[in-house]
Amino acid sequence: MDAGGNGPCMGSCNDRSERIAMRRLAVLLWTAAVSSGCTDHSGPSGTISTYALARVGPSHLPVQLSEGSPQLLVADTFRLMRDRSRTNLETLRQTTVIQNGAGGSTEKSETDFEYRLEGGTLVVNNCPIGALCATGLVYAPRIFQIEGDSLFELTPLGANLPSRVYGLVRHP
């Protein structure tokens, strides 16, 4: 403030023109800071749809991560996003919340995967974006049948894994 208690001059402004110049500079810097957040073209540009895990096999959430485990899967969501980077990847962001025992602390993780739509299925590359994975060996794609507003996981034949069902919660 100047000696009169006005403006952003912090005691260094001697006349009205300096105060006006400082205000204009402040407005210009604020405008530049706000608008710079809208020019990032390197990542996902927006959510297409959001799906939340409704059940694992016949069980509704929360469910144990594995038999005998004290950890509970509390929430799991898929956000399908469009990517505006040069790679034009379709990105699925999976957000998972795990609880350490009943009433224990929770841990949230987010991981990005590539996906593609093929007919009536959603095919998710199970290797996280940016990771080095031995594709075809351990990281086979996850496949979901799209039926109405739900995604039904198609587990590989012979796999003793319960399939997951996700329900649509947001579609712009």
Image (cartoon, helix red, strand yellow):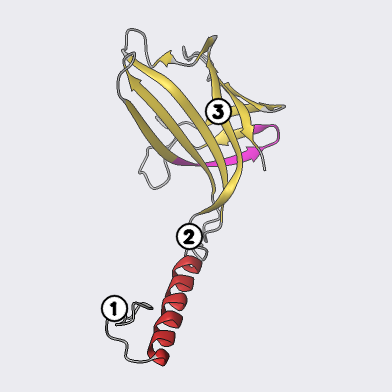
Mark 1 residue element: loop
Checking the image for residue 52, the label placed there is 3
The amino acid type found where label 1 is placed reads: Met
Left or right of residue 167: residue 77: left
Left or right of residue 120: residue 47: left
Q: Position of residue 58 (x, y in %)?
A: 55, 9
Query: Magenta: predominant secondary structure element?
Result: strand
Of the image marks 1 and 3, the number of the one nearer the N terminus: 1
For mark 2, does the 10 Å Cα neighbourhood hold few (<14), some (14 to 19), or many (20 or more) residues? few
Instruction: Please identify, in this view, whether the residue under mark 1 or under mark 2 is nearer the observer.
Output: 1
In the rendered view of the protein, which quadrant contains the N terminus?
A: bottom left
Q: Position of residue 106 (x, y in %)?
A: 34, 26
Looking at the image, is 81 positioned above or below residue 41? above
Q: Position of residue 72 (x, y in %)?
A: 38, 17
Looking at the image, is 60 positioned above or below residue 129? above
Looking at the image, is 68 positioned above or below residue 5? above
Residue carrying label 1: 10
Q: Quadrant of residue 129?
A: top left
Mark 3 residue element: strand
Q: Which residues are magenta?
A: 112-121
Q: CA distance from mark 2 to mark 3?
A: 26 Å
Q: Position of residue 105 (x, y in %)?
A: 30, 24
Residue carrying label 2: 42
Of the image marks 2 and 3, the number of the one nearer the N terminus: 2
Mark 2 residue element: loop
Q: CA distance from mark 1 to mark 3?
A: 52 Å
Instruction: Please identify, in this view, whether the residue under mark 1 or under mark 3 is nearer the observer.
Output: 1
Checking the image for residue 31, the label placed there is none
The amino acid type found where label 3 is placed reads: Ala
Indicate whether residue 16 is drawn in magenta: no
The amino acid type found where label 2 is placed reads: Ser
